[in-house]
Amino acid sequence: MKKPIMISAFCIALAAALLFWGFRWSGSIPPQEEKTYGLTIQSDTGSYVMQLRKGMQQAADELGVRLEVYTQSEARQADGLAGAVLWLEQPSAEAERLKSLGIPVSIVGQTLPGFACVLGDAESAGKQLALYALSQADKAHIVLLTDDVDEGAAARSRAALAVAKAENVAILGYLPDMGLPENCDLVVTVSQRATLDMIQRKRNQTFKGMVLGVDTGESRSYDLEEGVIDAMALDSPYAIGYLALYQAYGLANGDSVSNDYAKVLLATRENMYLSENVKQVFPLLH
C-alpha cells in the first residue's frame, strides 16, 4: 500500500515542479520584436509603385520582417526603422536625415554617392536595343538617337553607342522635332522623351519605319499592341523592390554599400504575352 502512495506523491511533486519552472522559464524570455523596414515614396499611385511594393513585400515575407509604406509627407514617421528604402525624385535630403539617425538606406531608381542603390540595368537595355535593331534592319538604314537627359538615358546611350560605333550605324543626338535621314527605316531611342516623340510621329505618319525605345509608362501595353513601337526596354519594379528590401536588410546586418541592378526585359508584340513577361508589360493586372 505504501508503494502506490509514494509513487503518487512523487508524481504530484514532479508535476508541481514542472508547473513552477515552466511558468518561470516562459516568463523569463521577452517576446522577440519584429524588425520593421520602411518604403518612402513620392506618391502611392501608379503601376510602378504597386509592383515595387509587391516585390518588397515578397522579400519581407521571406526575411520575416515587417514592411511599412510612407508618403514623403509622412517620412518623419520612419524614424526608428531597422532600414529604409527611398523612391523619391530628390532623395538626398531624406537619405542624409535617415543616415544621421543610424538607419541604413537603399535608394531606388537612381544613384546617390555614399548610398546603396537599386536600378534597372540601363546599360544592358541600351545594348539589347542596339543589337535587336541590327537583327531587324540593314545597319545602313538604322539611326541611334542618343540622349543624356537623365541618368538612365545616359547609361543606355553609352551601351548602345558602343554597339553602333562598332557597326558603323548612324548616330545623332536627340533634339525635339529633329529631322531624320531620308533612308532611315529604324530608329533606336534611349530616353522616354525621344521614344514618345517617335511614337507620335508614327501616329501622325510622319515616320513609317520601326521604333525601338524605352518604357512609355501606363500606355506601354497599348503602344506595343497598336504597333507604334516595335520593341520596348522595360524595367521590373517588382524585381527592383525585391532587391531593395534585401539590400536594406543586408546593410542593417553589416553588408557594405554597393549598387544592385535588376534585369531588363526587351518587350515586343511577339513576347509580351508570355507568362514570364506579363507582370512587366501588364503590371496593373498582376
Image (cartoon, rainbow, N blue to C red):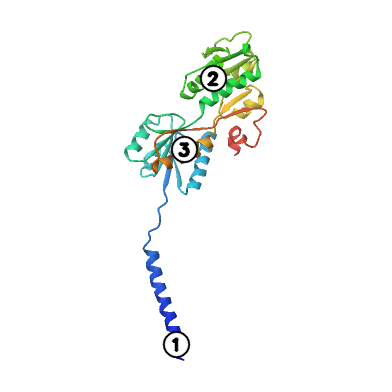
* Whether residue 46 can be seen here: no
User: Element under label 3?
Assistant: helix
Left-right relation of 130 to 260: right
In this view, the residue farthest toward the top is 182
Q: Position of residue 259 (x, y in %)?
A: 44, 32
Left-right relation of 216 to 74: right
User: In the figure, 23 relative to 130: above or below?
Assistant: below
Between 274 and 79, the residue placed more toward the observer is 274
Q: Cα distance, mark 1 to mark 2? A: 91 Å
Q: Which residue is mark 2?
A: 160
Amino acid beneath label 2: Ala
Answer few, some or many: residues within 10 Å of disc 1's Cα (few below 14, many 20 plus, some between 14 and 19). few
Task: Please give the name of the residue rendered at 64% of the width and 9% of the height, measured from the top-left corner.
Answer: 183
Task: Please give the name of the residue rendered at 64% of the width and 20% of the height, measured from the top-left corner.
Answer: 135
Quadrant of the image containing the C terminus: top right
Left-right relation of 232 to 73: right
Q: Which residue is mark 1?
A: 5
Q: Cα distance, mark 1 to mark 3? A: 66 Å
Task: Please give the name of the residue rendered at 38% of the width and 64% of the height, measured from the top-left corner.
Answer: 27
User: In the figure, 52 relative to 197: above or below?
Assistant: below
Q: Which residue is mark 3?
A: 244
Between 222 and 146, the residue placed more toward the observer is 146
Mark found first going from the N terminus, 1 or 3: 1
User: In the figure, 41 relative to 123: above or below?
Assistant: below
Q: Position of residue 161 (x, y in %)?
A: 53, 17
Amino acid beneath label 1: Ile
Foreground tag (3 vs 2): 2
